[in-house]
Image (cartoon, rainbow, N blue to C red):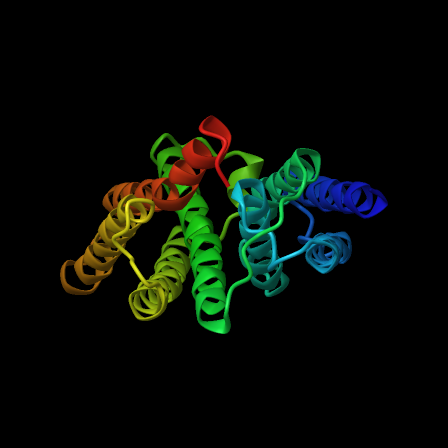
Amino acid sequence: MAIVLISLLLYLTATLLLVRGMGDARQRPSRAWLWPAGAAIVLHGGYHLTVALHTSGGPDMHFFAALSLVALGMAVLTALVGARGRMAALGVVVFPLAALLLLAYHGHGHAPSKELDWQLASHAWLALLAYATLSIAALLAIMLWLQERALRRRDFRPWLRALPPLADLELLLFRTIAVGFSLLTLTLVTGVLFVDDLLAQKLVHKTVLSVLSWLVFGTLLIGRRRYGWRGVKAVHWTLSAMVLLLLAFFGSQFVIELVFGRG
């Protein structure tokens, strides 16, 4: 489909512009990447909307569709943060990932989904937004770890200059976690309120793993506030919580849909 190919090309163009800007430390970072990135995001979202309009039931939220939607959310957040001059380097990872997952969704095909009422739909969209925000936090944590490691080794490479100062990066990480934690809290609350049987056989592992991830993120935020947790400790806690969250939905959906072939 043309819309997919054009979106892929625009995502890759934005990535190349970012890489070129990172390679020249003497030049002020350009925001030329915003135009192709913004257009790619619009087309990415438009593709999902087109599929939803031509597919019976509600919006497709099966395994590859959900991955593509999370990647779309990550691309939107990256563009918003990068447009303010902070962490545009995230796009070097996020934009190719969004392109890859959009292509995977298109290649796998579309399946009709069960039509959801507004309560369950709000729960599902909150969950996807929480995943996108906390996935950005996980990428920020990895960048924080790489930056600390490079500084300890005095390995000053061009990509390092593309990142904000260590303290700013750490502050952005915890702000992102706080937003994602709030969204995850709303997801769990709406799940309790709107899902008929949250501990049903198909949902119990998702519920338990999501609650465990929520506890880890919450403990990290408390540790940051009360004990000043930072650096490698913050990275470990962030990535551990994110692994639990990924297993909660995408791990189980992978097994259910792709291994056992159930919708």
Q: Position of residue 126 (x, y in %)?
A: 45, 64
**Res 186 → quadrant:** bottom left
Q: Which residue ends up furthest to the left in the rendered image?
A: 227
Q: Name the one closer to the observer, 153 or 75.
A: 75
Looking at the image, residue 209 sits to the left or right of residue 2; the answer is left
Q: Residue furthest right?
A: 2
Q: Is the residue 27 above or below the residue 107 in the image? A: below
- Residue 130 falls in which quadrant of the image? bottom left
Quarter of the picture containing the N terminus is: top right
Q: Nearer the viewer, residue 127 or 156?
A: 127
Q: Residue at x 44, y 31 (%)?
A: 155
Decide if residue 148 is on the left or right side of residue 84.
Answer: left
Horizontal and vertical percent position of residue 247: 35, 40
Residue occupying the point 46% across, 60% down: 124
Which of these two is toward me, 38 or 43?
43
From the top left corner, tell me how far across and down residue 167 is, in percent.
Answer: 37, 56
**On screen, residue 155 above or below 195:** above
Position of 107 relative to 237 (above/below): above
Q: Which residue is depicted at the point 48% across and 36% down?
A: 262
Residue 237: which quarter of the image? top left
Residue 174: where, in percent of width, then height? 34, 59
Q: Nearer the viewer, residue 84 or 104?
A: 104
The mark tally for this picture is 0
